[in-house]
């Protein structure tokens, strides 16, 4: 009986169903939605696994630094050819 009381006391999902009424399934522990409405999904991948991750490789500062290094190498190569 205690377990049944705990289930009944659990917070409800609250997502809207197709009928427009709120879902009455119990929400997953620590989340606001039930297993049907996205409570089990962990979300987007973290850091590099996310396609939208920014590494800083294409920032203006890093591109300028790479141009500067290429120019230094080009000048050094010209100096050693003589």
Image: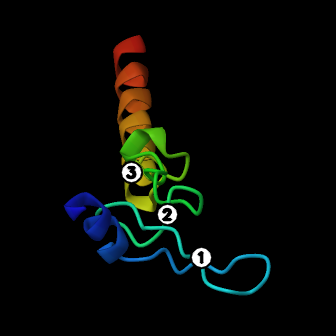
The 10 Å Cα crowd at callout 2, few under 14, some 14 to 19, many 20 or more, is many
Q: Nearer the viewer, mark 1 or mark 3?
A: 1
Residues at discs 2 and 1 in contact (Cβ within 8 Å): yes
Q: Is residue 81 above or below residue 30?
A: above
Upstream in the sequence, badge 2 or badge 3? 2
- Residue 13: % across, % down: 49, 74
Q: Nearer the viewer, mark 2 or mark 3?
A: 2
Upstream in the sequence, badge 2 or badge 1? 1
User: What is the spatial separation of the Cα atoms under label 1 and label 3, in whole angstroms?
Assistant: 50 Å
For disc 3, the marked residue is 62
In the rendering, which numbered label is found on residue 34? 2
- Residue 38: % across, % down: 54, 59
Residues at discs 2 and 3 in contact (Cβ within 8 Å): no
User: What is the spatial separation of the Cα atoms under label 2 and label 1, in whole angstroms?
Assistant: 8 Å
Q: Is residue 6 above or below residue 45?
A: below
Closest to the observer: 12 or 73? 12
The 10 Å Cα crowd at callout 3, few under 14, some 14 to 19, many 20 or more, is few
Q: Secondary structure at mark 2?
A: loop
- Residue 45: % across, % down: 45, 45
Q: Determine the residue located farthest toward the top in the rendered image.
A: 81
| Residue at point 44%, 57% (across, down) | 59
Upstream in the sequence, badge 1 or badge 3? 1
| Residue at point 45%, 44% (across, down) | 67
Q: Can you tell which quarter of the image residue 77 is in?
A: top left
Q: Is residue 4 left or right of residue 54?
A: left
User: What is the spatial separation of the Cα atoms under label 2 and label 3, in whole angstroms?
Assistant: 45 Å
Q: Quadrant of the N terminus?
A: bottom left
Q: Can you tell which quarter of the image residue 36 is in?
A: bottom right
For disc 1, the marked residue is 23
Residue 78 visible in the snapshot: yes
């Amino acid at each position: 009986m205690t377990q049944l009381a705990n289930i009944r006391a659990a917070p409800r999902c609250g997502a809207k169903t197709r009928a427009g009424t709120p879902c009455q399934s119990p929400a997953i522990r620590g989340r606001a939605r039930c297993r049907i409405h996205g409570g089990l999904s962990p979300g987007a991948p973290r850091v590099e696994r996310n396609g939208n991750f920014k590494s800083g490789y294409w920032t203006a500062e890093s591109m300028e630094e790479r141009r500067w290094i290429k120019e230094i190498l080009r000048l050094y190569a010209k100096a050693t050819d003589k």
